[in-house]
Image: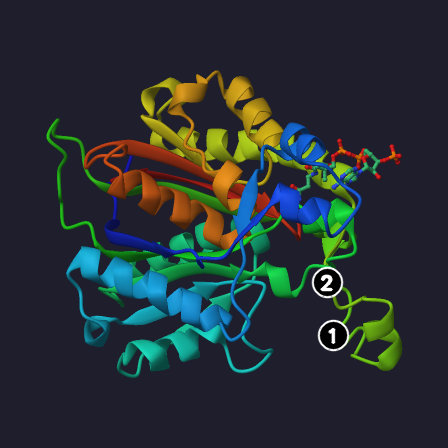
């Protein structure tokens, strides 16, 4: 295995303070706390306040990651924001983050790979560092899904939450863990398959279906999902994403300390973990408190786990995600 080129220098996250519980949802749509918990594992999710926008959450998470990394905004060479809920179609949310951080002029762009967006961002950042073109890269995963969810549609509105997570990546520089193993991004593999593109989408509001009174009336500018299509492919591909990334490192699942899966659904995670032969105490989880925050889910969970002391320097973490597109990916990192 080639030595890692990049390393996570610091992590951060932001969750809006407002909590929406399953009991709150019982008052909004025909659902029950029991149904939501049994089918998804979710008890509550965070909801951004009215004046808050995606780049506000991204900036808060980024500030926290920069502080942990001891890197100033002025040192950033590249800003990548993974999101499917941008502040607006143009310009990129990444430039608003750049503005709010007071970062200097550098490339700043968004990546749209839904729930797999953070792993796509990580992989892109690694390429720039590997080539020697960049030294300090900010990767943010952020979603404000509460504003694109149809709150009358019980099949989707119970699933999602708002939040942001961020990492600062820098050159691995030969850093070693206490056991002499190299620290850094050991492998990443990203993939997409458009065959199921119509199974999870926001159909209205783009060039295919410009906003009109009819689109708004029919709520075609909100999330539409064929849940069972996604469920089936998620179970299969979360496993293969992790396995393929592990294969690139020559490691097996039992050699990693932690699995950090996209928090889509407890049942999807349990299936994938059991297929990998990993015990549940190795699987990081916060879906009960946070719900599905799409691009933000992995960096939020990673930062919470590092800050709580659960994941320690030198630990190996396997991340995996799948989402709309469908797009999916896996990454193995020694923290
Ligand atoms: N409360 C109560 N009943 C509900 C709700 C709800 N919130 N939502 C659906 N139901 C009903 C349905 O109407 C249906 O009723 P019927 O039998 O009378 O027709 C019944 O529950 C079963 O519906 P299914 O869709 O078959 O339920 P399923 O067991 O597939 O669970 C779920 C639905 C949780 C969405 C599941 O398909 C799933 O998790 N899919 C993955 C989707 C996902 O995670 N998407 C997130 C984005 S992609 C990603 O992050 C991987």
Q: Is mark 1 within 8 Å of ligand 1?
A: no
Q: Residue at x 21, y 34 (%)?
A: 312
Q: Residue at x 35, y 32 (%)?
A: 249
Circle 1 sits on which residue? 205
Q: Nearer the viewer, residue 305 or 136?
A: 305
Q: Is residue 163 above or below residue 103?
A: above
Q: Is residue 107 above or below residue 49?
A: below
Element at label 1: loop
Structural distance between the alpha carbons of marks 2 and 1: 8 Å
Q: Which mark, by number, is residue 202?
A: 2
Q: Which percent across, then down, holds residue 196?
A: 75, 48
- Give the crowd class for mark 1: few <14, some 14-19, many >=20 residues within 10 Å: some
Which scheme is used to colour this image of the protein? rainbow
Residue 25 visible in image: yes
Callout 2 touching callout 1 (CB < 8 Å): yes
* Image-based side of 222 in relation to 126, left or right: right
User: If the picture is divided into quarters, which one holds ligand 1?
Assistant: top right
Element at label 2: loop
Q: Which percent across, then down, holds residue 266?
A: 57, 31
């Amino acid at each position: 295995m080639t030595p890692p080129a990049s390393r996570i220098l610091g992590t951060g996250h932001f969750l809006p303070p407002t909590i929406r519980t399953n009991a709150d949802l019982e008052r909004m749509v025909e659902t029950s706390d029991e149904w939501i918990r049994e089918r998804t594992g979710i008890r509550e999710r965070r909801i951004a306040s009215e004046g808050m926008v995606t780049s506000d959450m991204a900036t808060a998470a980024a500030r926290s990651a920069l502080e942990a990394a001891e890197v100033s905004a002025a040192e950033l060479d590249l800003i990548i924001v993974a999101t499917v809920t941008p502040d607006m179609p143009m310009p990129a949310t990444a430039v608003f983050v750049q503005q709010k951080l007071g970062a200097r002029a550098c490339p700043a762009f968004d990546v749209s790979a839904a729930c797999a967006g953070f792993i796509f961002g990580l992989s892109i950042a690694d390429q720039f560092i590997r080539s020697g073109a960049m030294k300090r890269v900010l990767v943010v995963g952020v979603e404000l899904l509460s504003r694109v969810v149809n709150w009358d549609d019980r099949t989707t509105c119970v699933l999602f939450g708002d939040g942001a997570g961020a990492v600062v990546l820098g050159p691995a520089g030969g850093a070693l863990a206490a056991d002499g193993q190299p620290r850094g991004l050991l492998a990443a593999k990203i993939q997409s398959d458009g065959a199921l593109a119509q199974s999870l989408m926001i159909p209205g509001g783009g060039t295919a279906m410009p906003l009109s009174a009819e689109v708004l009336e029919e709520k075609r500018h909100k999330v539409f999902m064929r849940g069972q299509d996604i469920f089936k492919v998620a179970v299969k591909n979360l496993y293969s994403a992790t396995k393929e990334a592990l294969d690139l490192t020559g490691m097996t699942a039992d050699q990693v300390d932690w699995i950090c899966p996209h928090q889509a659904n407890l049942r999807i995670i349990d299936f994938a973990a059991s297929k990998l032969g990993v015990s549940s105490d190795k699987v990081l989880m916060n879906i009960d408190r946070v719900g599905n925050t799409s691009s933000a889910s992995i960096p939020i969970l990673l930062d919470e786990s590092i800050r709580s002391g659960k994941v320690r320097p030198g630990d190996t973490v396997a991340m995996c995600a799948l989402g709309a597109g469908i797009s999916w990916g896996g990454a193995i990192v020694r923290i």
